[in-house]
């Protein structure tokens, strides 16, 4: 079964047509990277998949279910944003447990999930700290932890590393690749960074001006770019 199918999805804001006939599939367990220049519609596409924006037309299927009218919290997804968007008045533990408490998960279940996620992300020493007492990298790990405890089938990452310095960016990238291996979930990862796309992806979706330009594995796109734009973007010589 596919984790996600988009069929001719369009999104306009007023008379600005931002997403144009987006059709693509994400297989179960697949790591898919959406790549394209700033302003091409990557964040809007994630927000439409998450249900934070309604599609203007087209069909969104998650796990075999049409979700166009399903609210974000019921789509079985979790999103990690570029800005960490942690609650400043809540501890790390509080940030990680908030959604689970809203879901009325039993206390033992919540504790078990937080223990597991904080072990995976090396956050155990920081559970009682507040966001202002953490480094940028630690905050981003809390944001990832907050997504993991919800045990989604599909993770959406929107340029999660763009606020980190180069060394931390590489470490966190490796951590995300390891998480993908450890978790039974599909991931969609948005970036404008070619290196991130080439190293993380099973499959790359190249976006340009709200359209899908090409879809393929990193090697397919590198060896057989559909046009100059893809070639230029992914750094192949042709
Ligand atoms: P990216 O994430 O690839 O940089 P975005 O999805 O943020 O691109 O934006 C794509 C286009 O949609 C931009 O031209 C942006 O100005 C426009 N856009 C995004 N959100 C809105 C909105 N809420 N209202 C109007 N225009 C928007
Ligand atoms: Mg964006």
Image: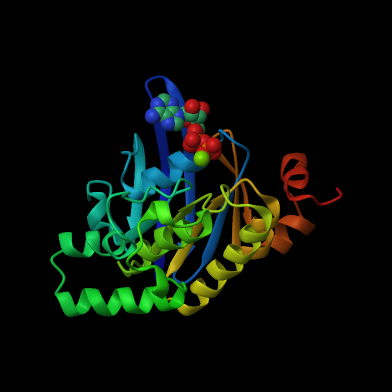
Residue in the foreground of this view, choosing between 153 and 203: 153
Image location (x, y in percent) of residue 187? 47, 63
Is residue 201 among what the camera can see?
A: no
Task: Please indicate whether residue 153 sits to the left or right of residue 204 in the image.
Answer: left
In the image, residue 136 above or below residue 174: above
Colour style of the rendered protein structure = rainbow
> Outermost residue, right direction?
237
Image location (x, y in percent) of residue 10? 42, 36
Image location (x, y in percent) of residue 208? 61, 37
Q: Residue at 58% across / 48% down in the picture?
A: 162
Task: Please indicate whether residue 101 sits to the left or right of residue 182 in the image.
Answer: left
Which image quarter is the N terminus in? bottom left
Q: Residue at 79% across / 58% down in the picture?
A: 223
Residue 98, picture quadrant: bottom left
Task: Please indicate whether residue 107 sits to the left or right of residue 7 in the image.
Answer: left
In the image, residue 3 above or below residue 89: below
């Amino acid at each position: 079964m596919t984790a996600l199918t988009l069929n001719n999805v369009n999104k306009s804001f007023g008379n600005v047509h931002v997403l144009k006939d987006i059709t693509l599939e994400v297989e179960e367990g697949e790591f898919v990277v959406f790549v394209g220049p700033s302003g091409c519609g990557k964040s809007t596409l994630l927000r439409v998949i998450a249900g934070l924006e309604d599609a203007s037309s087209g069909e969104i299927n998650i796990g075999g279910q049409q979700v166009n009218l399903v609210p974000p919290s019921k789509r079985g997804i979790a999103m990690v944003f570029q800005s960490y968007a942690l609650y400043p008045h809540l501890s790390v533990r509080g940030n990680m447990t908030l959604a689970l408490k809203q879901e009325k998960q039993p206390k033992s279940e919540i504790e078990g999930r937080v223990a597991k996620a904080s072990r995976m992300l090396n956050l155990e020493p920081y559970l009682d700290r507040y966001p202002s007492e953490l480094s940028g990298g630690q905050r981003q790990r809390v944001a990832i932890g907050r997504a993991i405890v919800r045990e989604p089938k599909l993770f959406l990452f929107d340029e999660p590393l763009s606020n980190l310095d180069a060394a931390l960016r590489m470490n966190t990238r490796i951590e995300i690749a390891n998480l993908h291996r450890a978790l039974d979930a599909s991931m969609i990862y948005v970036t404008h960074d070619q290196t991130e796309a080439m190293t993380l992806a099973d499959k790359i979706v190249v976006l340009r001006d709200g359209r899908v330009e090409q879809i393929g594995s990193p090697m397919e796109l590198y060896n057989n770019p559909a046009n100059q734009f893809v070639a230029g973007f992914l750094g192949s010589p042709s």
